[in-house]
Image (spheres, grey):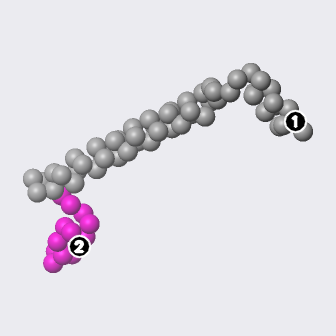
């Protein structure tokens, strides 16, 4: 194993030249989770929010759903 480098072994050491690998991974993962959470919250608000229908339109829609 001594003849292979860090890249081939996919086992980087924590050093100056690999600091970006160690720092960027949790930052990107956390950022992705935050974006996913914001997207899910906005989507839930859109789906459960008011539909913009008048009461007559809402009643007509309910009649259509029941039939």
Q: Of helix, strand and loop, which mostly describes the magenta segment?
A: loop
Secondary structure at badge 2 equals helix
Q: Depth check: 15 or 67 in front?
A: 67
Whether pointer 2 and pointer 1 mark residues with C-beta atoms closer than 8 Å, the reply is: no
Residue for badge 2: 8
Q: 19 or 9: which is nearer to us? A: 19
Write the start and end of the magenta stretch as one range.
Answer: 1-13
Q: Residue 10: horizontal and vertical position, in percent?
A: 26, 66
Quarter-wise, where is residue 62 in the image?
top right
Q: Residue at x 61, y 34 (%)?
A: 47
**Residue displayed at 28% across by 50% down:** 25
Q: Residue at x 55, y 30 (%)?
A: 45
The residue pinned by badge 1 equals 66
Q: Position of residue 34 (x, y in %)?
A: 39, 38
Q: Is residue 8 above or below residue 14?
A: below
Q: Secondary structure at mark 1?
A: helix
As for residue 10 lying within the magenta part, the answer is yes
Q: CA distance from mark 2 to mark 1?
A: 63 Å
């Amino acid at each position: 194993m001594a003849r292979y480098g860090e890249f081939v072994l996919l086992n980087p050491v924590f050093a100056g030249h690999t600091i970006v690998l160690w720092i960027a991974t949790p930052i990107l993962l956390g950022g992705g989770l935050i974006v996913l959470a914001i997207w899910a919250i906005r989507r839930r608000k859109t789906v459960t929010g008011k539909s913009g229908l008048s009461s007559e339109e809402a009643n007509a829609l309910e009649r259509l759903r029941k039939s």
